[in-house]
Image (cartoon, rainbow, N blue to C red):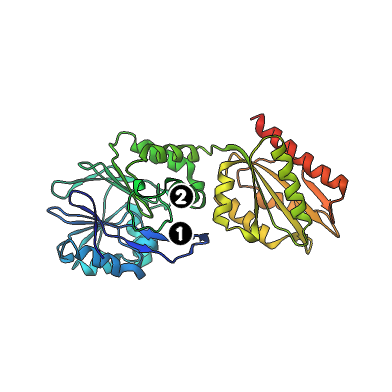
Amino acid sequence: MDAVKIADDIYWVGAIDWNTRNFHGYDTPRGTSYNSFLILDEHPTLIDAVKAPFFTQLAQRIRSVIDPRKIEYIISNHSEPDHASGIRMAQALTGGAQVFCSKMGKENLRMNYGDLDVKVVEDGSEMKIGKHTLKFLYTQMVHWPDSMMTYVHEDGILFSMDAFGQHFASSKRFDDEVDEGVLFEEAEIYYANIILPYGPQVIKALEMLKGLDLKVLATAHGILWRKNIDKIVGKYMAYANYSTEPRAVVVFDTMWGSTQIMAELIADGIASEGVPVQICRVSDTPRSTIMREVMMSRVVILGSPTLNNGIFPSVADIGTYMKGLRPKGHYAAIFNSYGWGAGTTKQMRDLLNGSGMEFPFDDLQVQFVPDEAARAKCKEFGKKIAQKILSG
């Protein structure tokens, strides 16, 4: 396994995980990669390790360009196990390279991986490793408290950690070598499921990057950006400001089919006003796909049948997941099909309280199978949602 040159004396030496299909509850149908980078200089420097089970790939790629024992420094941009779990192995491979990290990273590395010889780099500080100058930028909560980015002045390369990443396994390394539509879809899914709660921190990080000459965004996961840098940075600014599109998503599950009838009629009412709408049945659609639709939609319509006087389990699951990701600035609407007793819509509202979403619509409840009058109410419910979207 060979290293891939991304600039003079700078190489990608990471690992490709073709077969992973889940990343802490987030479906990854296209796999992922754990990106690590090697800078050859007077003081050869490794930027991040990889997930421990994939360490052999890292070691082989390093050996394709240098004797690992010549590496003097290891930069740990954050302590999450998808990269840092291989750090002790990397230190052993190099014969004891000095590890550098953020102030909070030092303690987190110790708690996760035991005692390590670690030196702290301060926010905004610089380090010469020969002809290359590394600048360290603290980016707390993008998306870990100890996260930082590392910038190489001479080459305009930003090792951006979790920002701008995607879970996307590929034999190609750059954005102009892969399908652009697929790439941006995966970048959107990644943001919606990992970065979404941290809008203010993302804005702060983007402000820090404004004065930098960015030629490559070298991400922690997936494809590196060199062609579409302005486009992906612009999308991040929009996401961080919780901007939405004039569209809606209906997220629901069904037990005997009544809630599905309601979902489809509500969507039909929305579409009849010329507003785009997407329907996602929770039991058939990955959480991560749903969250991309939620992030981009002005209105989120959540529907559930009543089971045991409560929310259907799969809907409670996506509601909990959604609340944790806090899609602020969205409107939410609630609908419910029940048999023996009403009341589930209040539980659904309570579940989403604290998510940052607003509830400008009255809840819609239908008992048993929707009759003609109930069907008309569902379609009218959808029209009111569309009109709210169109009015801004």
Which numbered disc flags the more N-terminal residue, 2 or 1? Answer: 1
Which residue appears at 31% of the width and 52% of the height? 102
Q: Is residue 34 above or below residue 127?
A: below
The CA span between labels 2 and 1 is 10 Å
- Which sits in the foreground, 262 or 95? 262
Disc 1 residue type (three-letter): Arg
Residue 46: % across, % down: 24, 57
Residue 296, quarter of the rendered image:
top right
Taking the image as shown, residue 371 lies to the left or right of residue 318, namely right
Residue 339: % across, % down: 84, 59
Disc 2 residue type (three-letter): Val
Residue that numbered label 1 is attached to: 30
Q: Is residue 56 above or below residue 359?
A: below
User: Is label 2 in contact with label 1 (beta carbons under 8 Å)?
Assistant: yes
Quadrant holding the N terminus = bottom left
Other-residue count near label 1 (Cα within 10 Å), few / some / many at <14 / 14–19 / ≥20: some
SS at circle 1? loop
| Marker disc for residue 182 | 2
Which residue appears at 16% of the width and 62% of the height? 66
SS at circle 2? helix
